Image (cartoon, rainbow, N blue to C red):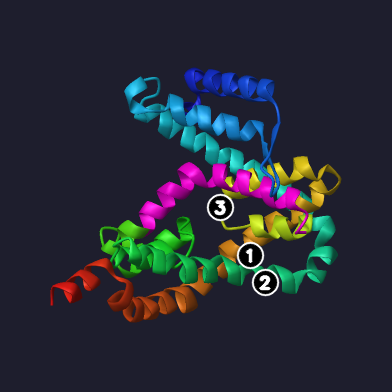
Amino acid sequence: MKKLLSWKIQLIVLALVVVAEFIGIKNFDLGIGVVALFPMLYALIIGAVISLPKLKLLSEKDMNIAANILGISFMLFVAKLGTLMGPSLPQLMDAGLSLTLQEVGHFFGTIVFGLPIALLIGMKREAVGATFSIDREPNLAIIAEKYGADSPEGRGALGVYVCGTLFGAIYLTILASILANSGWFHPISLAMGAGVGSGSMMAAMTGALAIIFPESANDIALFAGAANLITTIVGTYVCIFFSLPVTNYLYRKLEPVLGRRSRKAENKA
């Protein structure tokens, strides 16, 4: 526990919170919708800047401490979600089919859209690891167990994991603002879409939605948490028995057609 007690980290976090809250919520009309920028987004961006190695403000040890504190924070957040789920179990049961079906999109989308793009930009077996899921912790474990962490598939999965960790929360905050202000989707539908299996991404998207739809804040947190839980539990089995085999099958079919190196070889011939 003493390893987590870093006054430097605590003061930096406090400063980030004060600055982010002082800036407040900013709305920008893009025509197709209004993008709302929230304090969490500012804190993420400022935190990313001050953690750049060139600035030497934070050491690797400081970052490890911050990562451990973040894990504890997410545990508290999940505990809060649990207290919301209990009294609302009948409501969740009524939406059971919707919660289950939205799981299909998390994996179908990454394979159908992600795999062809990965092949077009020149990825080989890395494309399998990068596109069979959104590549959070359980998905990394699946790839590491089947192919090894140092395999091309492992590198692809780890690359997406790092990108998701760095930019996922920012991306989903902006996306949630655009979709919520478009009027095309019900707040609960967007909340279920926020449960992608990542605590930080879910927190970012639900935070944005709760500000835009304050009257539905509790329901948004409830359904997002339920969807996230289903994604984490059910999604692991979906990845093993469906997503990964399908991605491998499509890779064998699409790589000779879309693969950059394959097309170069054909042109030379």
* Helix, strand or loop at mark 3: loop
* Helix, strand or loop at mark 1: helix
In this rendering, does residue 3 appear at all? no
Q: In this view, does 135 lie to the left or right of 174?
A: left
Residue pictured at 36% horizontal, 68% vertical: 128
- N-terminal of the pair, mark 1 or mark 2, is 2
* Helix, strand or loop at mark 2: helix
Residue pictured at 36% horizontal, 25% vertical: 59
Q: Distance between the residues labelled 1 and 2?
A: 7 Å
- Classified by dominant secondary structure, the portion drawn in magenta counts as helix
Residue on which disc 2 sits: 100
Res. 254 image quadrant: bottom left
Q: Is residue 23 left or right of residue 255?
A: right
Q: Give the crowd class for mark 1: few <14, some 14-19, many >=20 residues within 10 Å.
A: some
Answer whether residue 177 is magenta in the image: yes
Answer whether residue 244 is magenta in the image: no
Residue pictured at 34% horizontal, 81% vertical: 253
Q: Which amino acid does label 2 sit on?
A: Thr
Residue on which disc 3 sits: 198
Q: What residue type is labelled 1?
A: Ile
Q: Height in image: 22 above or below 234?
A: above
In this rendering, does residue 160 appear at all? yes
Residue 230's mark?
1
Where does residue 21 sit, x and y in percent of width and height? Answer: 68, 24
Residues marked 1 and 2 touching at CB (< 8 Å): yes
Q: Give the crowd class for mark 3: few <14, some 14-19, many >=20 residues within 10 Å.
A: many
Where does residue 236 sit, x and y in percent of width and height? Answer: 51, 68
Q: What residue type is labelled 3?
A: Ser
Q: What quarter of the picture does the C terminus occupy? A: bottom left
In the displayed image of the protein, which residue is found farthest to the left?
Answer: 269
Q: Which range of residues does the magenta coloring cover?
A: 157-185
